[in-house]
Amino acid sequence: MISPAAPSSALIHSSTHCGKGSSSVRDGSELSQPLEPANVRAFWDNINQEDEADRSAATNTQQKVVDIAKQRMLVSTIIHQKDHKGAVMLGLYTQRLCDVYERLDKPSRVVFLQMLSREFCTAKGDAQESARRYLESAAKSSDPIQSVLFARNLRDDLTPLYTELFDQINRLPGGFAFLVHMRADMLAQIRNDRDDAALRAMSDSLMKKLETWIIGTLDLKRITWNSPAYTIEKLGQYEAVHAVKSWLDVKRRLGNGRRCFGFFHRSVPMEPLVFVWVALTNEITGSVQSILREREPTSTLGEGSAKCAIFYSINSQPGLSGVDLGNFLIKRVVAVLQAELPNISAFCTLSPMPRFRVWLDQWLTQERLSHPPEDIAISKKALDALLSRVPTATTWTAALKHVIDSHGWTSDQQTLDAMEPVVCALGAHYLVSIKRGKAHSALDPVANFHLRNGACLHRVNWRGNTSYNGLRQSLGLMCNYNYILDRIEDNNENYVRDGTIAVSGSDSYVDAAKRLSLSSSAKL
């Protein structure tokens, strides 16, 4: 059985077990034969013999060349023998390939994935011939059945060969989890080489497969301190927003006044695919430190007195990047909390703004440093206060850049007070008005996620995250998105249609940014 967890330390594996002296296993002809117990025993006997040979072989360049040749042969056997009888034997080959992959080190996995994406993609010759036949049929034939057959053949020939390998792996026990971890390896390599179009195409193809396979296979579970240690360990491993520092940290996040829910695939019942942390509070919280550091939240009056559910971190396994599970998870968790705690009336997030600092650095061009823009709603009093902190600056934008590029400004209270209205106004402008190219969607990925789900932008929070990562990403800014249940559908429709951002509450920075955005749109 494939291990449901990604291997934490992989051994360098030097063979896929397609050596000489075992041609009956290599050519795939036995797949058309009735599978007898002796066949299975012989298969594993060959593997065991080759394992011994592999472990004793020296690891060198020549050996690695042989390895990729063996891996190529094993993949080819799995893909091209799919129509033969003997599904059990085909499953054994597939299991063998998975075992080989799990033993590879990272560089060897990259070599394997590149081989798979380039050599087992669409068969160009077959696709070109099918396209020619389909076009001829469409132009000359009046037989609709013949056209449908040619269209089906064209579709099949355009389908990359590696999708058959993915299908075979998914049929194995634990195969779904294996593919999730394999895609995580693909994404890691794509980040290192963004020009690898073949690997990117294979990653996208596998993502679509995973989306299809997930449907109807997820179970929502609450994770508590009494959950299996393996599950709790995965929370720390996959937490990407607010790092888990210790077991005590996890225990606090799972304690009184806190909730954690996850979606679990039925083939991997102990490992969450996606999970969300929730804090039960008496008001909409603006600081993640108050959530993470509070030792006994809601302990005085009890959870029954909480008015708000704050979703402060949503995480998924890296291999599921691009698969939209967070939307469904939030909706399911809201329903569970409504049934359990009817006293809760507000469902909000406390969300990061991960690209705000990058955008701000790019926005502070030489032109804006010399001639500040007038489309940001900041009072003259606030601008003068910021300028007073940097006597050498002649514009507020130059003063801002000087402060954020300096060290220690977060330790000076007067500087913090002068920065607050300027940074909050810029943060609200960034969320409300800055779009992706010519698209209607928000540039900020977290904002786009929640706004597409029908949430309202509620408030920007100064010093919402004072951790190193929070200051590095967004100068400490965070924001709240408010899921007002009877407005979700309308908000979603308006945002998807024309990028309209719904707001709630009475945050002066958000309101001012919204007014300026509407005014600018009216002038166009």
Image (cartoon, helix red, strand yellow):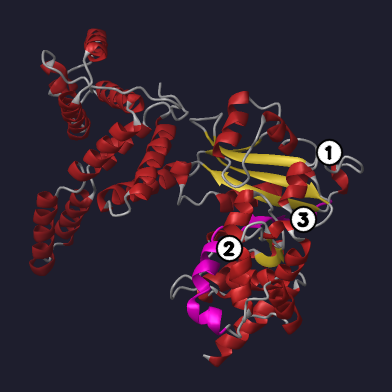
Quadrant housing residue 129? bottom left
Out of 41 and 522, give the one closest to the viewer: 522
Q: Residue at x 15, y 47 (%)?
A: 123
Residue 285 numbered mark, or none: 3
Relative horizontal placement of residue 350, taking residue 65 as reference (left or right): right
Q: Residue 336 at what x, y percent from top left?
A: 71, 45
**60 in relation to 141, above or below:** above
Q: Residue at x 61, y 64 (%)?
A: 404
Q: Secondary structure at mark 2?
A: loop
Q: Which residues are magenta?
A: 343-371
Which residue position is annotated with label 1?
296
Q: Residue 357 at what x, y percent from top left?
A: 56, 63
**330 in relation to 46, above or below:** below
Q: Residue at x 77, y 55 (%)?
A: 285
Q: Earlier in the sequence, mark 3 or mark 1?
A: 3
Q: Secondary structure at mark 3?
A: loop
Which residue position is annotated with label 2?
405
Q: Amino acid at mark 1?
A: Glu
Q: Is residue 55 magenta?
A: no
